[in-house]
Image (cartoon, rainbow, N blue to C red):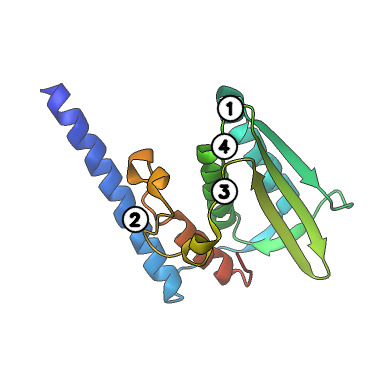
Amino acid sequence: EPTTLLPIQDEVSRLSGLVQDLHQLSLAEVGQLSLEKKPTDIKQLINRLIHMYQAEAIEQEIILTLNDQIKQKELILHIDPNRITQVLSNLLSNAFRYTKKNGTVTIQIKTDRNWLTIEIIDTGKGIEAKHIPYLFDRFYRADSDRSRNQGGTGLGLAIAKEFIKLHGGNI
């Protein structure tokens, strides 16, 4: 029966995603994940992300904004745009998941000497300081509100950390 198969199909899809996430993470951790770095306008990449998340922001009644503190029109970086998009999408999804109606999610970009800083700032309830050192560990959940019932595999931040490390950055 279709009503019986649909939950099974959903679970197979979730498990396939988990296996794919674990595979990516394992490759990244041992330095075997290939990056396809190319000159990329990070401002354009961030503006595309804002455009992608705008419908979700409207639906959840969240204000999504960009705080661009960089004066130049373009900022070209030698990065893998797909991996960086995956990192930022993960962070934005988390911000939207824990920000309530009428809250805000802001992407802030700025430079400090030779470093680019991208911050995702939200008005969600936040995370207790005692959990911060473990946020990027595989499967770590800070509290019961961050359960698997709300989606996700618990690998997104661990993957994000490895992708940023491969780019020579910090998260």
SS state under label 2: helix
Q: Are marks 1 and 4 in contact (CB under 8 Å)?
A: no
Nearer-N-terminus badge (3/2): 2
* 30 to 106, vertically: above or below: below
* 115 to 87, vertically: above or below: below
Along the horizontal axis of the image, is 56 left or right of 72? left
Q: CA distance from mark 4 to mark 3?
A: 9 Å
- Any mark on residue 126, and which? 3
Looking at the rendered structure, the kind of residue marked 1 is Lys
Name the front one of labels 4 and 3: 3
Looking at the rendered structure, the kind of residue marked 4 is Thr
Q: Quadrant of the N terminus?
A: top left
Residue tagged by mark 2? 20
- Any mark on residue 101, and which? 1
Q: Quadrant of the C terminus?
A: bottom right
Residue at 34%, 55% in the rendered image: 20
x and y percent of residue 77 in the render?
A: 72, 61
Residue in front for this viewpoint, 159 or 34:
159
Name the front one of labels 1 and 2: 1
Residue in front for this viewpoint, 158 or 78:
158
Residue at 30%, 56% in the rendered image: 19
Residue at 58%, 41% in the rendered image: 124
Along the horizontal axis of the image, is 9 left or right of 83? left
Nearer-N-terminus badge (4/3): 4
SS state under label 1: loop
Q: CA distance from mark 3 to mark 1?
A: 15 Å
